[in-house]
Amino acid sequence: MPRRIAALAAASGVAALLAIPTAASAATGHATKACYTHVPTKGSEPLTVALSGGTPGADYIVAATVPGRGTGSAGSTDGQFDAAGNALATITDVFPPNGTIEPTRGQKVALSVADYGSPDTSDMPIGTTLITTLALDVSSKPSSPSARRRVTVSGTPFAHKKVYGFIVKGKGKRVLRRISLGTGDVCGYTSAKQVVAPPGAPTGSYRLYVNAGKKLNKKKALAYAFTITRHYF
């Protein structure tokens, strides 16, 4: 009799275990880059999110949201999970949350996914990423062309790279002065005070080109045009 009671108890335990519903798998994901670049007047680098653990074959929506605003305020996209519950979602034309076209260290957007094959179809947070601008800014002060002024740049082409500026006459190729702007952070942001004028600051029209690396590469550089004049009283 004791053996029979033990067997029945074991069977009941198995039945109870089988009766417990299994939790539905939750979709997860992450941005494929730590920072994405917006190019003023030309659009933005696609924000790509790698998804996994979704319901195979089900629809999904991925949203990018500005903190404090409504879901999808920075953009969204939809699609279907593949047979393994994976997907690669792409949101296009995501702007920096504050709308700036100036250099920025990177502004945060929150990412979420809604799995429409899951019992819970609400938006589930899956992380954050940063949005920056591809931009160059040169301070107009001080007024003296020979004085050091703040030069700031941002954009993922400069991320984790040493950034330099090159002063040339007009659209020429000869570098009159090279300046170091430091190393770009994860969004390519870096800022330094440097003399932008050529040696001696002669009058004329010049350009400051900024690119990663010690050699001027106009095809990959941002440019800033300026003129040096003399006033006589």
Image (cartoon, rainbow, N blue to C red):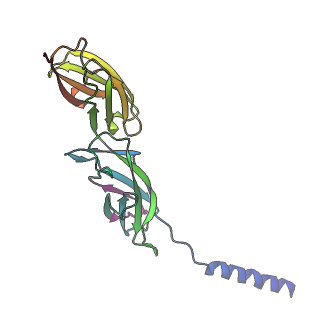
User: Above or below — where is 81 with respect to 137?
Assistant: below
Q: Nearer the viewer, residue 179 or 155?
A: 179
Task: Judge whether 152 appears above or below 24 on screen.
Answer: above
User: Which residue is at 86% across, 85% downward?
Assistant: 2
Judge by depth and name the residue closer to the eye, 26 or 18. Answer: 26
In the rendered image, which quarter is residue 225 located in? top left
Q: Which residue sits furthest right? A: 2
Placement of 158 over or under 112, stated as above or below? above
Asked if residue 155 is positioned above or below residue 228 in the image, the reply reads below
- Residue drawn at x 19%, y 24% as measured from the top left: 207
The number of callouts visible is: 0
Which span is picked out in magenta? 79-92
Residue 93 appears left or right of 29: left
**Does residue 224 appear left or right of residue 185 in this picture?**
left
Residue placed furthest toward the front: 233
Residue 66 at x, y = what percent? Answer: 37, 57
Quarter of the image containing the N terminus? bottom right
x and y, in percent, of residue 33 in the image:
39, 46
- In the rendered image, is residue 131 in sight? yes
Q: Is residue 81 magenta?
A: yes
Res. 28 in view: no
Given residues 87 and 32, the one toward you in this image is 32
